[in-house]
Every structure is written in C-alpha cells, then in structure tokens.
Image (cartoon, rainbow, N blue to C red):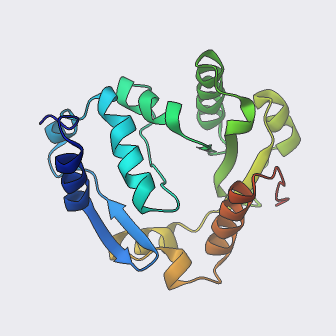
Amino acid sequence: RDWSSDVCSSDLLVTSMVMAHSPQLSLVAAPNEAHEAEEIRPEDIPEILHLLGQRFQCVVLDLPHTFDPVTVAALDLADDILLTLTLDIPGIRSTKRALKVFDRLGYPRQKVSVVVNRWSKGIDVELHKVEGHLGEQLIGFVPNDYRKVMDSINLGRPLVYSEPSSKIAVEIKRIAATLIAGGETSSSP
C-alpha cells in the first residue's frame, strides 16, 4: 500500500479505518492481522497524524513499549508523551530506560509526563524516592481495580462513560485535564 501517493486516497483510507464509538470518541483499531501493521512505514506517520489532526481535536496514540522506527516517528510528532509505570522494580527500571531513550532522542522533559498505573495504597514504595530515581514528577495515580478495567475492556465501554464517578475515571479525567492545561500539578495519592 502506498499511503503517501495521494492525499485524497490517504484521506479515504484514514476515513475507512476510523470507527466512531460515540459522538466524542472515535477509534482506529489495530489491524486484525499483525502483518498488516508492517505495511505502515515511518514516513507514513506524519501524513496519517496530520489527517487525523484535521478531523479531531485530540489524537491519542497507544503505542507499543518498543522503540521501533514507526513508534519513534509517532513519538517525534507527539505534543505530549504520557509514560505509564507500575510501582515494581521491573516497571521502574523500564520507565527509567524509556526516559533515557527520550533524552537521547532530544525530547524536552516538559513533553514527557509519568503516571502510575494500577496504584494501590497498600504498595509500600516511597513515591518521592521513585520520583528522585526517575528524575521526573509523577503526575497521576490510576487506582488498581482489575475487575472494573477488564469489564470495561471486554464490553468495549470506557469507564469514563460507563462509570464516570469511579475513582479510575475521575483520575483519568484529572490527568487529561492536567495535560490539556499543560500544567505540572501532581495528584497526591
């Protein structure tokens, strides 16, 4: 597939891939077959994101945890990068490595925000020590509620719609508002 050959055909292709979930939310799902994703090249990303940006106020990319050329092309164009971590040794190490890669790629630190995922008050980790180790302030703490999240995923209903007053939905909305405002306000757990 030659995505960049014609803006009109690219626009039609993007349109065919966008699925409206609600009046406020649309989705471009991953392809059914993994090999179909290989057809997307790093040089295609600017055009794809430009076309999506013309149609939508905000484009959110859920990228893999690898730094392949397509992922880096998308990260290069991102206004904000939200890096999620879990408060365990592998999660903290992985986040530290990702921050080092972002530094090597020349991303300004204000472009990157770190959020704790699956946070629980029972986790015996001193948050200020994690922030010190990472050299980054944690801007949010998404509570751990495995059952609610799995139900949301399996039913295809985002918690911010199906249970807007749940602790997870409230924190996700607060993090989104923080990013939109460009602020560095952190949430204390």
Q: Which residue occupies the extreme top position in the image? A: 104
Residue at 61% in and 73% down: 169
Q: How many marks?
A: 0
Answer whether residue 126 is visible to the viewer in this image. Answer: no
Residue at 58%, 21% in the rendered image = 101
Expressed as whole percent of the image width and height from the top left, the position of residue 80 reads: 62, 44
Q: Quadrant of the N terminus?
A: top left
Residue 27, above or below 167: above
Location of residue 24 in the rendering, given as x and y in whole percent from the top left corner:
46, 76
List x then y, in percent, for residue 123: 74, 52
Q: Seen in the image, is 12 located left or right of residue 139?
A: left
Comparing 27 with 13, the one in front is 13
Asked if one can make out residue 102 in the rendered structure from this viewpoint, the answer is: yes
Asked whether 172 or 142 is in front, the reply is 172
Q: In the figure, residue 142 lies in which quadrant?
A: bottom right
The answer to whether residue 188 is left or right of residue 115 is: right
Quadrant occupied by the C terminus? bottom right
The structure residue drawn at horizontal position 65% and vertical position 40%, both measured from the top left corner, is 88
Tell me if residue 147 comes above or below residue 138 in the rendering: below
Foreground residue among 92 and 21: 21
Position of residue 145 in the picture relative to residue 132 (left or right): left
Tell me where residue 157 appears, x and y as whole percent.
41, 77
Q: Judge whether 134 appears above or below 23 on screen.
A: above
Examine the image and state in which quarter residue 113 appears. top right
Give me the residue at 58% from left, 19% from top: 105
